[in-house]
Amino acid sequence: MVLRITVEPVATVQVHIIPNAKIDTMVGEHGDAIKIKLRSPAIEGKANGALRRFLAEKLSIPQRAIVLERGERSRDKVVRIDGLSEEDIRRGLLEPSRNSSTAIR
């Protein structure tokens, strides 16, 4: 009997959220964090849900692969993303060819 173990990449990234924006969009980098503007207000977890939806859409992954590790009530958050490396995440969010269409209205 042969036992196969497959390991999916798992990465954590820091994000800095600006709630109550006019549109959902990537802004760029904010120190080590990725800066994202979201239309949702920062009340009752609405911005956290909007962040998960935004990241899932931009990275073409299911929302269940995105877990808020820290920062539930803060603009500065740490997000764990299953199935992608940190390099894949940063490339997917910060790459200029993708940024031209990152605004969600």
Image: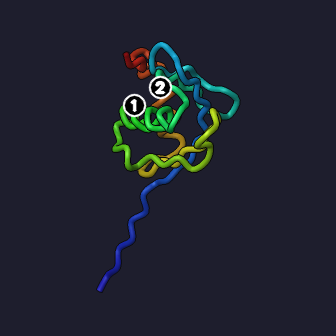
Side of 51 where 30 appears, left or right:
right
Circle 1/circle 2 CB separation < 8 Å? no
Query: What's the residue type where badge 1 is placed?
Result: Lys
Crowdedness near tag 2: few (<14), some (14–19) or many (≥20) residues, C-alpha within 10 Å? many
The location of residue 68, given as percent across then percent down, is 53, 46
Crowdedness near tag 1: few (<14), some (14–19) or many (≥20) residues, C-alpha within 10 Å? some
The location of residue 56, given as percent across then percent down, is 39, 37
Estimate the spatial distance between the alpha carbons at disc 1 and disc 2, rounded to whole Å: 17 Å
Q: Nearer the viewer, residue 85 or 14?
A: 14
Mark linked to residue 58: 1
Q: Nearer the viewer, residue 74 or 36?
A: 74
Name the outermost residue toward the right: 31
Determine whether the residue tagged by mark 2 lies in a helix, strand or loop: loop
Q: Residue at x 48, y 49 (%)?
A: 67
Q: Identify residue for label 2.
A: 40
Mark linked to residue 7: none
Quadrant location, the N terminus: bottom left
Residue 83 position (above or below residue 30): below
